[in-house]
Image: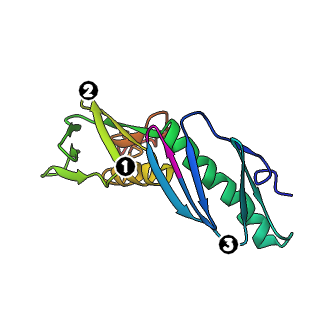
Amino acid sequence: MSRVGRLPIVLPSGVAITIDGSRVVVKGPKGESERTFDERMTIKLDGNVLTIERPSDEKVVRALHGLTRSLLNNMVVGVSEGFSKELEIRGVGYKAEAGPKGVKLFVGYSHSIDYTAPEGIEISVDGGTRVRVAGTDKERVGQVAAELRKMRPPEPYKGKGIRYVGEHVRSKVGKTGAK
């Protein structure tokens, strides 16, 4: 059996789940999440424990077993605790400003970049150089953080750009003058 797929998911208090065939709706204090899973997977709720069963040991079905469990767990964690990613902006004159529905980035271009956050995603700015992306859907939070980082990825010579907090960017040695 799949090591990930056979792990049970314990629902925290305040989280309600509705299973309608392959469609699952999870409601919690942070919001609501809905997803349709592969029909071959059987999702069972016993009290406050969620389990996923698979019909056979085919390679594709085994992979779907672990995937289904991971996606369900992310839905439960998202509506109960939420997900967040932090980005930091480095560079002289580089900064971010919080807008009404997104963020405005000043990252070395001749113009500012306005980024509008998709629904369900909150973007906040701390001190002008730290951007926090938060929401209930792990996939969308990661995608928005990646799109913001893509506006000006960190360059290897001076380290200027947008990077994840804790990300290590290898520095290259610049040119040495002619002798």
In this picture, is 87 found above or below 66?
Answer: above
Residue bearing the label numbered 2: 127
Is 31 in front, or is 95? 31
Horizontal side, residue 169 vs residue 53: left or right: left
- SS for dot 3: loop
Residue bearing the label numbered 1: 149
Q: Residue flagged by tag 1: what amino acid is it? A: Arg
Cβ–Cβ under 8 Å for marks 2 and 3:
no
Task: Give me the disc on residue 39.
Answer: 3
Mark 1 burial class by Cα count in 10 Å: few <14, some 14-19, many 20+: some
Q: Does the magenta stretch include residue 68?
A: no
Q: Position of residue 48 (x, y in %)?
A: 68, 41
- SS for dot 2: loop
Task: Give me the disc on residue 118.
Answer: none
In this picture, is 167 found above or below 112?
Answer: above
Is 17 in front, or is 66? 17
Horizontal side, residue 178 vs residue 82: left or right: left
- SS for dot 1: helix
- Residue 57 appearing in the image: yes
Total labels drawn: 3
Question: Over which residues does the magenta segment extend?
Answer: 26-30
CA distance for labels 2 and 1: 18 Å
In this picture, is 46 found above or below 158?
Answer: below
